[in-house]
Image: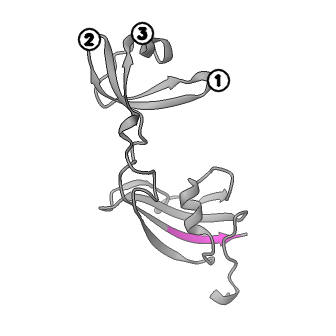
Amino acid sequence: MSSTNAPVVTESSYLTLHYRLATADGKDIVTTFGSTPATLLLGQGQLAPFLEQRLLGLAEGTHTTFDLTAAEGFGERNPDLIQVVTKKTLDENSEPDADYQVGDLVDFRAPGGGRFAGVLREMRADDAVFDFNHPLAGQPLKFEVQLISVL
C-alpha cells in the first residue's frame, strides 16, 4: 500500500500502535515498544487527550516522535496544589493510621465517591504537606508513536 492511500487517524479511529512516553532526556515513563502493541479507540479516554491530538491526521505506517512542552503535556506545576492536610483529614480520607513516608503517593477519597492522589512532601506533628500536581506536571516530554493499523 502506498503512503498516499494509507488511512489516516481521525477522532474516532481504531488504532493498533506502539507508543512511548518519555522524559525529555529519554527515560521511559511508559512504552509498548519491545512488547505487544496497544489497540485503542480514540476519544474513549484510553490515551490522554493531548496525546490523541498529536495522532490526528497521521497516516498508517507513520513512525515519529513529538517533543511536548510541559504546558502541552500534563501542564505547568501549580503552587496552589501544594496543600497542608490535617492528620484528622488524612485519617478520614485515606488509610487510617498508615505509616506514610515522604515521597509516598497517597490515595484520598473525594466527595461524591471519587478518588484523587497527592505526593507526601512533609509529615509534621499535626498535619502533612501534599503535592496534588500530576507527578509529570512541569516536565517536557517526548511522545514516540509507530502506527501499525488505522481503521
Residue count near mark 2 (Cα–Cα under 10 Å), binned few <14, some 14–19, many ≥20:
few
**Amino acid type shown at disc 3:** Lys
Marked residue nearer the N-terminal end (3 or 1): 3
Front-most of residues 14 and 58: 58
* Residue 128, position as x, y percentages in the image: 32, 20
Q: Which mark is residue 88?
A: 3
Which residue occupies 56% across, 53% down?
Answer: 48
Residue at the farthest front position: 80
Can residue 37 be seen here? Answer: no
* Picture mark count: 3
What is the chief secondary structure element of the magenta stretch? Answer: strand
Marked residue nearer the N-terminal end (2 or 1): 1
Q: Is disc 1 placed on a helix, strand or loop?
A: helix
* Residue 61, position as x, y percentages in the image: 59, 78
Does 72 appear above or below 120?
Answer: below
Could you tell me how far apart the alpha carbons at marks 3 and 1 are, in whole angstroms? 19 Å
Which residue occupies 45% across, 51% down?
Answer: 74
Magenta stretch holds residue 24: no
- Asked whether disc 3 touches disc 1, contact meaning CB atoms under 8 Å apart, the reply is no
Front-most of residues 18 and 87: 87
Marked residue nearer the N-terminal end (3 or 2): 3
Q: Which mark is residue 112?
A: 1
**Amino acid type shown at disc 2:** Ala
* Residue 59, position as x, y percentages in the image: 62, 78
Q: Is disc 3 placed on a helix, strand or loop?
A: helix
Could you tell me how far apart the alpha carbons at marks 3 and 2 are, in whole angstroms? 11 Å
> What residue span does the magenta drawing correspond to?
145-150
Which residue occupies 73% across, 69% down?
Answer: 151
Can residue 112 be seen here? Answer: yes
Left or right: 84, with 111 as reference point:
left
Q: Which mark is residue 125?
A: 2
